[in-house]
């Protein structure tokens, strides 16, 4: 079938297998072009099929030669419906890892569930023995609690007061004003339950109790802080409250693992085009302005560059891992440079529909959005027939 992009808001409902595979291969090629990292040997990535999770898995295998287990919730092709982008990404990764002689395994299912945790533990015990790095990179809009059965849904809202600021329809280029009403107490509670640290804690507890977590293991989860422009809807909103919970969990886990030489961190990463960030009002317009500034300064990074820098310079760079006053790893340091933020703020003040393509890299944002799903990728013939049915090697 000929596969074309079909969008619904900030979601693309189709994905192209060849485009996704090429995007994955280019990330692998980047990592292989860099110096090797003396790092982890057996890695679990929870949320492994897209974005920072996928990039973490690629860096682990192709910079450190690590064996990996990837846990993710993606769907295979069915009838006229393509598979999800994460499915195609994972198939490409697994194939490349297999060809490189690196062990890799995929578990598809609800990472929040007891069933998937137990299945993952059994696989680790059988195939790897123990793991020495756990990457927690889950991005989900909802979660069913494995003990209580309650289903929580997250919201992207400010706290306390109505939030008003510029936003953009990145498909049309129209700059408008977003008005977002504040979250209720229950919406806040549910967002923390979905996006906070409880499930990360559960993963580490169960891995440790099962004896499949190495005593000196490292675990890392990902977060974002961002500039004042986005604080009210992000860092000071419902998501920010969830991230605060995630960071508090990291401190608890660091004490829990530290008694035997293990460690736990939250890495604050750069703003990038992801399915999650596309859903947050204001953020796509901010990222578009940020991309323009960082590209002009020659310091722009994508997911793979960020994760290679995290692993090579921070987690496994030798010596003590550099953290800020709150104990956070900051690989958003280039984004948050004073000169970068000053120029972004200046652009922001003048952004409007009439000049958005001139004052920002909105076209780059839009292109990267479609590349998340395997489209608009140089080297792919999108008028040619493509088989949407792709098997994932080592799927358990």
Image: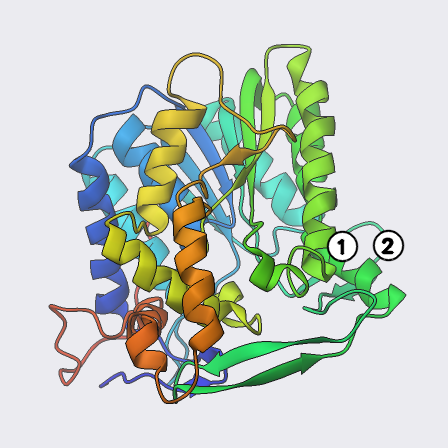
Picture layout, residue 318 above or below residue 30: above
* Residue identified by numbered label 1: 192
Q: 363 or 136, which lies in front?
A: 363
Q: Nearer the viewer, mark 1 or mark 2?
A: 1
Q: 334 or 26, which lies in front?
A: 334
x 68%, y 82%: residue: 179
Earlier-in-chain disc, 1 versus 2: 2
The quarter holding residue 392 reads bottom left
Q: 46 or 292, which lies in front?
A: 292
- Colour setting: rainbow
Instruction: Residue 38 in the image: state x and y as whole percent.
Output: 32, 19
Residue 133 lies left or right of residue 302; in this view the side is right
Instruction: Residue 203 in the image: state x and y as whole percent.
Output: 66, 37
CA gap, disc 1 to disc 2?
Answer: 16 Å
Q: Which mark is residue 148?
A: 2
Dot 1 surroundings within 10 Å: few (below 14), some, or many (20 or more)? Answer: many
Residue 98 lies left or right of residue 183; in this view the side is left
Residue 372 lies left or right of residue 214; in this view the side is left
């Amino acid at each position: 079938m000929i596969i074309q992009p079909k969008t619904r808001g900030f979601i693309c409902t189709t994905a192209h297998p060849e485009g996704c595979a090429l995007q994955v291969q280019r990330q692998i090629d980047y990592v292989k072009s860099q110096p090797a990292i003396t790092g982890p040997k057996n890695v679990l990535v929870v949320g492994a099929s897209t974005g920072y999770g996928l990039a973490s898995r690629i860096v682990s295998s192709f910079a450190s030669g690590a064996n990996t287990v990837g846990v993710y919730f993606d769907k295979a092709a069915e009838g006229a419906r393509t598979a999800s982008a994460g499915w195609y990404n994972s198939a490409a990764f697994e194939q490349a890892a297999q060809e490189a002689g690196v062990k890799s395994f995929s578990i598809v299912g609800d990472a929040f569930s007891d069933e998937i945790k137990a299945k993952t533990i059994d696989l680790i015990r059988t195939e790897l023995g123990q793991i020495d790095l756990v990457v927690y990179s889950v991005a989900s809009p909802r979660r069913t609690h494995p003990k209580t059965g309650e289903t929580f849904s997250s919201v992207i809202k400010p706290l306390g007061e109505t939030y008003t600021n510029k936003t953009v329809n990145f498909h049309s280029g129209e700059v408008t004003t977003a008005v977002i009403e504040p979250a209720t107490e229950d919406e806040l509670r549910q967002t923390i339950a979905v996006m906070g640290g409880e499930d990360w804690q559960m993963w580490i507890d169960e891995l440790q109790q099962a004896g499949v977590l190495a005593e000196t293991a490292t675990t890392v989860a990902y977060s974002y802080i961002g500039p004042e422009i986005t604080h009210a809807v992000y860092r000071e909103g419902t998501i920010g409250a969830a991230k605060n919970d995630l960071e508090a969990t990291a401190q608890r886990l660091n004490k829990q693992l530290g008694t035997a030489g293990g460690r736990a961190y939250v890495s604050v990463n750069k703003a990038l085009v992801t399915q999650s960030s596309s859903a947050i009002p204001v953020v796509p317009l901010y990222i578009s302005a940020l991309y323009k500034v960082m590209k002009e300064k020659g310091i722009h990074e994508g997911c793979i560059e960020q994760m290679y820098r995290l692993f090579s310079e921070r987690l496994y760079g030798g010596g003590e891992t550099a953290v800020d006053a709150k104990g956070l790893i900051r690989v958003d340091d280039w984004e948050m440079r004073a000169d970068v933020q000053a120029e972004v703020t200046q652009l922001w003040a003048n952004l409007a529909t009439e000049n958005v393509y001139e004052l920002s890299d909105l076209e780059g944002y839009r292109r990267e959005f479609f590349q998340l799903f395997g489209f608009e990728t140089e080297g792919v013939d999108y008028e040619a027939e493509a088989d949407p049915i792709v098997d994932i090697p080592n799927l358990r």
